[in-house]
Amino acid sequence: MRLDFYHAARDSLLLYEAIIPVKFERQLDSINHSAVLIHNDCHYLSQEILGLAFEYRSDFPASMKELVVFADLAPRFQMLAEEVLQRQIKLVIYNLKQAIDGADGFQNTHQMKQYESAKLSIDQVIFILEKVYIIWHHLLLPSAYKRSMSMVLETVFARIANDILLLDDIAAEETLQLQRLIHLLFENLSYLLDSVLSINQTGKLQEFPARTLHDLIPSLRKLRKLADLLDMPLKSVTAVWESGELVNHGFKQSEVEDFIRAIFADSPLRKECLRKLESTSY
């Protein structure tokens, strides 16, 4: 009888593993509470399964104790939990990239129509992240929330910085509009950045985090610095490159050279500054 109960328990877990991804396929293909709850359930089961054999082993005869095994199921449920979470992260990133695509590379934002289009894209990014925050922050374990949200934010900041740095001709009015868009993004996401920073590596809240936001989201530093560069004089841009500050913020030499060519007209000063960049190695 005890062995029957053991097999029934194993079969129930295996049935759950097989049915859940099929029964909730529609929910797993969209950003919602249900998918996160499924992730949580699978993670919880992976932890509880490890203790099943120890909890009930004493109830079995000595000849059967070696047959009562649950530990092999724990990694399967942990893997299922991670698959569900990664699926949600990919969906979020896909939606965010689609929103940023609407900015058309942030080109010609000195023109009202193009600026409004780019602003709409930023607004959509903010809206998506707010929705994700509401779901993830209240349901995910702190460590999972921190890891997942950092990954999503890194994708957003890296993409926006890259798009702006790819512009090959930036008018003077355009630099101010691009700067305004970056500031708009950060102003509306400050609470979200704080939520990531408030969790330490062990998944517990702490007053003084051991890691900075720049450690967790490397492109945050780069995008913030890019906003500063957009209204810097040419000599100042050159000086911060020579100081090594831009390298520390994740800028490549080629990116800074292209940025200078895009913003500043050809002149003896520009040629001199570009030569300084080429002669500086890190």
Image: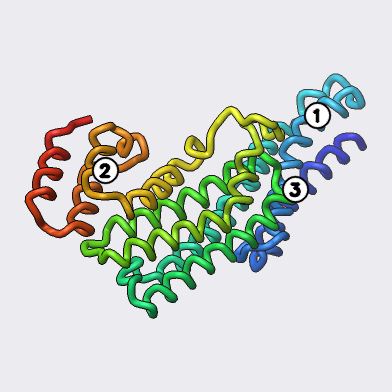
Looking at the picture, how far across and down is residue 271, in whole percent?
A: 9, 48
Q: Which residue is mark 3?
A: 41
- Relative vertical location of residue 241 with respect to residue 270 in this rendering, above or below: above
**Residue lying farthest left?**
268
Q: Residue at (66%, 58%) from the top-left corner?
A: 21
State which quadrant residue 281 falls in.
Answer: top left
Q: CA distance from mark 2 to mark 1?
A: 66 Å
Categorize mark 1 by other alpha carbons within 10 Å: few (<14), some (14-19), many (20+).
Answer: some
Mark 2 touches mark 1? (CB < 8 Å): no
Categorize mark 3 by other alpha carbons within 10 Å: few (<14), some (14-19), many (20+).
Answer: some
Left-right relation of 277 to 21? left
Looking at the picture, how far across and down is residue 50, in whole percent?
A: 75, 31
Q: CA distance from mark 3 to mark 2?
A: 54 Å
Q: Residue at (17%, 55%) from the top-left corner?
A: 261
Q: Nearer the viewer, residue 173 or 73?
A: 173
Secondary structure at badge 1 equals helix
Q: Amino acid at mark 2?
A: Ser
Q: CA distance from mark 3 to mark 1?
A: 19 Å
Q: Amino acid at mark 1?
A: Ala
Q: Earlier in the sequence, mark 3 or mark 2?
A: 3
Q: Which residue is mark 2?
A: 236
Q: Which residue is mark 1?
A: 53
Looking at the picture, how far across and down is residue 10, in whole percent?
A: 77, 42
Q: Earlier in the sequence, mark 2 or mark 1?
A: 1
Q: Nearer the viewer, residue 132 or 246?
A: 246
Q: Amino acid at mark 3?
A: Asp
